Image (spheres, coloured by chain):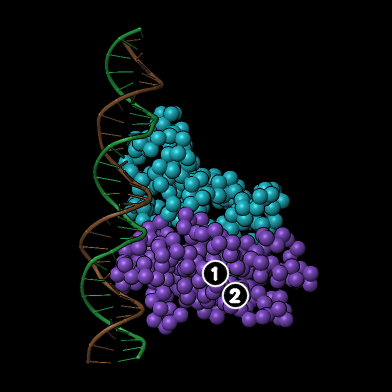
Chain colours: A purple, B cyan, C green, D brown
Amino acid sequence: MSDTKTKRLNQIFDATLRLTGEVGIAGLKMSNIAQEASIATGTLYIYFENKEELLNALYFKLQKESVPAIINDISHLAINIQLYKMWKIALERLVDNNLRIIFLEQFVISPYISESNKQIDIGFKNYLKQILEQGKSENLIKDANSDMLITLIIGFVRSFSTQIVNDCSGQLTEKSIDESFSICWDAIKK
Amino acid sequence: MSDTKTKRLNQIFDATLRLTGEVGIAGLKMSNIAQEASIATGTLYIYFENKEELLNALYFKLQKESVPAIINDISHLAINIQLYKMWKIALERLVDNNLRIIFLEQFVISPYISESNKQIDIGFKNYLKQILEQGKSENLIKDANSDMLITLIIGFVRSFSTQIVNDCSGQLTEKSIDESFSICWDAIKK
DNA sequence: TGCAACTATGAATAAATATTCATAATTTTG
DNA sequence: CAAAATTATGAATATTTATTCATAGTTGCA
């Protein structure tokens, strides 16, 4: 893919994410996306067949970039270190661009999502589950239902990042990463 | 308000919530809402000026029914009991109708929300904050940032209820309420 | 029962929004 | 540099969806 094309696509994707944060997927109009991306409406149709395809392409891209997809192998590390690393990366990425979550959560139950995109959900969950199961077998993690623990972790990381983003003075510092992880760890440790 | 009218309104609101769960606020069409509620499209306009008003009325109703609005005074109880009671009620209501959350979360950033409805957010947060601050002063709660703790609690209760609902075999039992609360309590207790 | 007031219907119309396309600008190629 | 190829434009058109309204059914009341 040519450099210009990649750049243009990102311009469109960024605009779409920003707008989703303002008006939700319900409020997305092709004309607004174009305006936000500083291009003409017609230009959108050079890059995408239609609105549905644009949104599905963005969804696919965000899934491809999800944390498990990009993290290096950490399976040799201690469980709590593995979790800490994931925690940190997830927080950093979400705070860097919290709009991802808004888009992803809304898109999966929107009328736009394609059948093939319904299938892919790389996400945290499977990856986390493995780690937690291992942790349980090593007697480091509470013997509670894994799905419940995963739920706790994901719920917390999402709402914590949202809070950081919404709080004007909010900054993600080493301290707040550590403090939040420590709370999370207290919740799940044996 | 006459009995018939109340019934009809609930019929419309229920249909809207169900549809929101399927297609999000982005996919809501007046014709579909009518169909889902088993009435004619035109009938919707007897009860509501337009789509925007319908959605805002639903939002207002859900806010009015939020946990802090309905819970009896529990301020005389011990902190962990207060929290447990709120936890239980919140879970029960969300599991009973998890669609509330989907609707509320999407609606607040939709193009439909009115200025006056932007103001009301009875929600958990203020109520929880009071309780937590008291708990800190009594040395029962971690001395972490209150907003962070609130975020943890809300994030967990939301995603836990979503999980219960999505898991076909999922049932909210006394055991799972207690188990989930205990995890949460471990996270925030001193 | 018959009349008035209220409620419901859904096809017709209006409004909003997606998409196209003739034209123009820009970039690439020889 | 000129021609060809590519990319961009935004007003015009097509499509979707909200809203209206003439008509019909229902309910309550004398």
User: Residue at coordinates 75% horizontally, 63% vertically from top-left?
Assistant: A143
Q: The disc numbered 1 marks a residue on which chain? A: A
Q: Nearer the viewer, residue A96 or B35?
A: B35
Does residue A83 appear in the picture of this structure?
yes
Q: Is residue B88 left or right of residue A169?
A: right
Circles 1 and 2 on the same subunit: yes
User: Residue at coordinates 49% horizontally, 73% vertically from top-left?
Assistant: A95
Q: Please, is residue A96 above or below residue B57 in the view?
A: below
Query: Where in the figure is residue A172, as x and y percent of width and height?
Result: 50, 77
Tag on residue A63?
A: 1
Tag on residue A69?
A: 2
Query: Where in the figure is residue B158, as x and y percent of width and height?
Result: 56, 56
Badge 1 or badge 2: first in the primary sequence: 1
Q: Amino acid at mark 1?
A: Gln
* Quadrant of res A7: bottom left
User: Residue at coordinates 42% horizontally, 71% vertically from top-left?
Assistant: A13
Q: Amino acid at mark 2?
A: Ala
Query: Where in the figure is residue B35, as x and y percent of width and height?
Result: 45, 39
For the residues marked 1 and 2, what is the alpha-carbon distance in whole angstroms?
8 Å
Query: Where in the figure is residue B165, as x and y percent of width and height?
Result: 61, 51
> Few, some or many C-alpha atoms within 10 Å of disc 2 (few <14, some 14-19, many ≥20)?
few
CB-based contact (under 8 Å), mark 1 and mark 2 = yes
Q: Nearer the viewer, residue B40 or B11?
A: B40
Q: Secondary structure at mark 1?
A: helix
